[in-house]
Amino acid sequence: MNKNKKNPFKKLLAIRGMGGALTAFAGLIIIYCAFGLINNTVFTGQNIMNLLRSMSKYLLIGIAQSFVLITGNIDLSIGSMAGMSAMIAATLMTLGVNPALAIIITLISCLIVGVVNGFLVGKFKLPPFIATLGTMFVTRGVAYMVNGNRNTDAIATGVGKDVADKFQNFFYYGTTLGIYNTFWIAIATFIVFFFLLSKTRTGRHIYAIGSNVDAAKLSGVNVVATTTKAYLVSAICSCIVGLILCAQAGMGNMEAGNMYEMYGVAAGVIGGVSPLGGTGILLGTLAGASVWQTLENGLNMVGAQVGIQRIVIGIIVVFAVLLDVVIRTGQLGKKRKN
């Protein structure tokens, strides 16, 4: 009878991608404590609050990229889409458009990009690197053109200070239960898409096409629809990040979201999401985004130069991908021996 009982820890590790997520969480604790011992300001309540708010953008962009990575693809348009989102929303509000309507128009614009990405990759079989490189340039071009190749004025000039303050407080500066709203927005988004990926048929199909697209087709999975759904999730998260960046600055910046697509890859792969597709969970992305922001925050606290920060994080990303490749190669080797 005891033989039939599974070890709870082994059962936990058997969950797809859980090993990478737990490793990232363990690394997070070690990194946070190490920086705290060097500079105890890391442990202060205000620093933790700021860390959570900053981490939220990485979490959202990590969710965006993780959905696409799990399908075995990539989305290079994420950062430019966030910039487009910030510029469209800000431009509309400077023209006096109600923030709610501006958000709806911005979301629709991003969803169109998601559908285009999904069809280019899923239906027309364009390499995802090329397809999303193209839409990356297009969306950044839209971000430049929407306000005549210049950053917007403060959104308060169009909708008024009270309305602008409400928008900015909702997405960035305001708090609920003592924690910045940005964090609650990210967590709510995380919960919705965690459920979608882990508890629905769409989620199972996303893993299936990432593991073996030909086998998924034979099993009746609609590859075009599933790929498009993954890119739509990416578009939604990118839109939210753009709104957060707009609220943070109180205006639209044409360069907003620059390099965020790479931040999304980093958050995902640090948390165990495989760039080869078919493996990873959003819990790992949460851990990866936390590791990224804790590293950035801690290195700032100890006075490390920006160049050093980028080198350290770059090494960690390469190591995470290398580890994934080694593990997969080892698994394939065992299968061949058997």
Image (cartoon, helix red, strand yellow):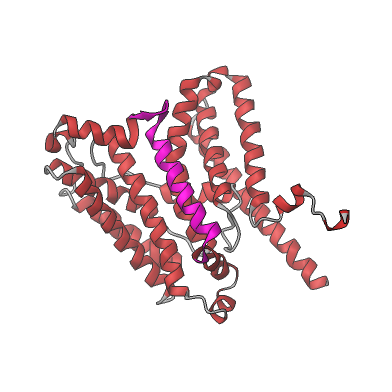
Determine the main secondary structure of the stretch shown in magenta: helix
Please tell me whether residue 211 is drawn above or below residue 296 in the rendered image. Answer: below
Left or right for 43, reference 142: right
Membership of 284 in magenta stretch: no
Q: In which quarter of the image is the N terminus?
A: bottom right
Q: In which quarter of the image is the C terminus?
A: bottom right
Q: Residue 1: in sight, yes or no? A: yes
Please tell me whether residue 176 is drawn above or below residue 329 in the rendered image. Answer: above
Q: Where is residue 93 in the image (x, y as percent from the top left)?
A: 17, 42
Please tell me whether residue 217 is drawn above or below residue 260 in the rendered image. Answer: below
Q: Quadrant of residue 180?
A: top left
Please tell me whether residue 135 is drawn above or below residue 55 in the rendered image. Answer: below
The magenta stretch spans which residues?
174-201
Q: Viewer-proximal residue, 327 or 197?
A: 197
> Residue at position x 73%, y 53% from top?
11
Q: Quadrant of residue 248?
A: top left
Q: Viewer-proximal residue, 58 or 10?
A: 10
Q: Where is residue 43 in the image (x, y as percent from the top left)?
A: 55, 21
Q: Where is residue 282 in the image (x, y as percent from the top left)?
A: 54, 51
Membership of 195 in magenta stretch: yes
Farthest bottom residue in view: 218
Left or right for 15, reference 70: right
Farthest front residue in view: 1
The tally of labels here is 0
> Residue at position x 62%, y 47% from top?
21
Q: Quadrant of residue 154?
A: top left
Q: Residue 77: in sight, yes or no? A: no
Q: Position of residue 150 (x, y in %)?
A: 18, 44
> Residue at position x 27%, y 34% from top?
168
